[in-house]
Amino acid sequence: MTSAPSARIGLVVNPVAGLGGRVGLKGSDGAEVQRRALALGARPQAVERAVLTISQLPPEVELITADGPMGAEAARAAGRPARVVHRPAGAATTAADTRATVRALVAAGAGLLLFCGGDGTARDVLDALGPEPRLPVLGIPAGVKMHSAVFAVHPRAAAEVAAAWAAGLGVRLEAAEVVDRDEAALRAGLVSARLYGRLTVPVLPTRVQQRKTGSSGPDPGTPAGIAAEVAERVGPGGLLLLGPGSTTHAVATALGAPHASLTGVDLLRLGPAGALGPGHADGLATAARVLIRDARADQLRTLPATPFIALSPIGGQGFLLGRGNQQLTPELLRAAGRERLLVLATEAKLAALAGRPLLLDTGDPALDDALSGHVRVITGRRSGAVYRLSA
Amino acid sequence: MTDRQTDARIAAKPALRRFHQARWDEKLVFELGTPGERGVLPPLPEPAVTAAVGDPAERLPAALRRAAPPALPELGQQQVLRHYLRLSQENLGADLNVDVGQGTCTMKYSPKVNDGFVRDPRIAALHPAQDTSTVQGVLELVHRLEQLLKEISGMDRVSLQPGAGSAAIWTNVSVIRAHHAARGELEQRDEVITTAFSHPSNAACAKTAGFRVITLHPDADGYPDIEALRAAVGPRTAALLITNPEDTGIYNPRIAEFVRIVHEAGGLCAYDQANANGILGITRAREAGFDLCHFNLHKTFSTPHACGGPAAGACGVTAELAPYLPRPTVEFDGERYVLDDDRPDSVGKIRPYLGAVPNLVRAYAWIMALGAEGLREVAETAVLNNNYLLHQVRRIRGVSVPYAEGRPRVEQVRYSWQRLNEDTGLHSEDLGYRAADFGTHYWTSHHPYVVPEPMTLEPTESYSRADLDEYAAILAEVAREAYEDPETVRTAPHNSTVHRIRPEPLDDPALWSVSWRAYRRKVLGEQP
């Protein structure tokens, strides 16, 4: 199926999307969380990310959008003319504003809808369009975690897909899942997702991220093996930043820190050599302590030593950086460098990527380029893989 | 669903064979029999013999005598025969059904005439400890088989001692270890590179030998990612263990480049040719630059797989690595065949004596019956059969053929039922269970699945066009049912011996029981 009855693209920006990320709140749903995020020093990023997309759109595309931070601001910053078809009621934008904008964009004849936000924004778009809508929709990733399969892998990739759609070039339309994750449950330490509905998404292979697969139990014995390798690399007494996910959590448990966070970033100090005694001779000579649980970016700004950073990709989707771990700022990642970046994944998790690369989107294109390439992945005791990591 | 309904469904499709397998609910042999029941009762020694030598058991050292009789089942001959005939009726296999579903395993026909050679007393009555002067014939056969396999592989020496494919891989890894140790580089070279589509024994043997394992995943075309290989090699590289074609059946045209990259880093390259059925007489390990290779004689060279052994592996190496091969080797001194056990650099014994000699006899007979042109015809027929089956299967609804779109394959194909899974929610395993209702089966793939919802088919040269048509028709029928009557597939098998089995006793080390003793301890909870 190919595209483009009209090269008129509708844009809606959820300016509060992603607010919670850098400050460790795991989401931005609801006015109270947004207020807390702003109080913790969060800066709205959705507008900046929309600018990255808009500035790459081909000139012949006609852009229609909502006023203010919901679209016009980003268009202005990107130096693009845009026709305003909706004005939000108040200064603080809400889910109702997103839905109203989407309806206005449809009424104004948008052939493709770009929305900038996260899973919550995707659900609002779906609510406005009704069940199983045919209108092509693509997300510009700006949320904290984006588990739905409706997002481009990067703001620039969204522009690539939109340009191909506008030119009528080889874009396939596919029904893609929108998932709903209960942010309150997430903050309580539970990872659970449910299918919310489906949107029609234009697809260029590798430019739209896959839906996160439900985390299955890790291979028996593997987390302990991965933990042993991590302990060997970090060394006794070393500092380790451990990213979110079931794999890293299991590794933390094997390292002797079972109370690490499932969904946040934790700072651990490994125990002294031989801390667990001769029974754990297999390199796992550590009883790690959690120094900071669920760390915010500002808490990681000054550390007594350069930490190792251990991350595991989001299952089935491949994001290593930039989804759910924005607390790891570009500054922190630069300081650690590629040598101290430990990539952890079970063989099953790598296989589930079906050849797609591991992805990163740190918000800093130069850093993305510096970290890209083939990386060593620790998959178990004395086991690894060499796998492609790309922006 | 009742069996009658199922029968009606099959009867309505005359094109497909009606099949119903035996189900005996047979107990394990350990649970059968009566105390004191025997198959053979040997007579007591004559009183004169006892008077002359006493009790023969008394002459055994005390440490070798049992305090109590062994806990063996006690059965008469008829009970034993009945038991195993019943089990044989509850099985599928290469001599019973169209066995193209065991992809990668090369389930070709094992000619029965070769079993006749093996049962001949001139082979069957030999003892491995006999003086070499009395077994010149079998030594000559082993020596000649080595010469044939040298020619087939292009390598300088071939060991026939390994008793299985994994034993052959273990031999290769042991030779690699010995090579680096002899150069004083073993501590430094602690990494072995392999690929996600390689047989898991490659990684397992490397780890058992003390190496770290680095896995290369396939690129978008299904080949091992050559850029990942470039990033992986270095001063720590001991070896690359790789297959070509891999389980996808796609030939890797850059294989010589892979070898060159590893050689430049100082590593050795071992070609896993367990299954060489698509390239016999067409390409050789030597020409691709490999240092080692191995064949499974029970795959490519027709000897039986023997339900887990003994099978036979053959390891080929370059002259440089020949001193490390298992000992003894069989040599010809110009007059006689002799065993050379004085090989100080050898990795030692992989298996006692010469290896699984009956399988060496079968493989020798098979090669001699075909000749060089016949071997090449085997490969060409296997490739033709595979591409014919590919043509039939790819038209079945819900099947896709990942990688190298539209290109022919070598000797096997890893298909995907992902589309059918998305449409119906049924998994590849479900379809495999339903295939058992038509008297066949298929294998998915090694875990973890790289190709989603996989099915691996390898028709070899043994099957006729009618056989392949029948197999494809069964798959088409199962796929049709998946779309139109998914419940029948979901609850299959209906006409087969075995019902769905729980995976935990296979996957969980705490439950798996590979012996009766382990079963009693782990499952029945008895204390040893």
Image (tube, coloured by chain):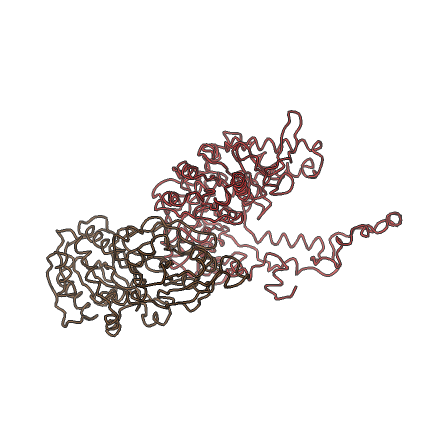
Chain colours: A brown, B red
Q: Quadrant of residue A245?
A: bottom left
- How many numbered marks have been drawn onto this rendered protein structure? 0
Depth check: give the residue in front, B446 or A313.
A313
Q: Quadrant of residue B167?
A: top right
Whether A184 is drawn above or below B517: the answer is below
The percent position of residue B456, horizontal first and vertical second, equals: 44, 48
The percent position of residue A231, horizontal first and vertical second, equals: 45, 58
Q: Quadrant of residue A329?
A: bottom left
Horizontal placement of B53 versus A233: left or right?
A: right
Depth check: give the residue in front, B312 or B307.
B312
Give the residue at the far top of this rendering: B334
Q: Would residue A228 be seen by someone viewing this image from the given angle?
A: yes
The percent position of residue A265, horizontal first and vertical second, equals: 35, 64
Depth check: give the residue in front, B435 or B376.
B376
Give the residue at the far bottom of this rendering: A32
The percent position of residue B61, horizontal first and vertical second, equals: 78, 51
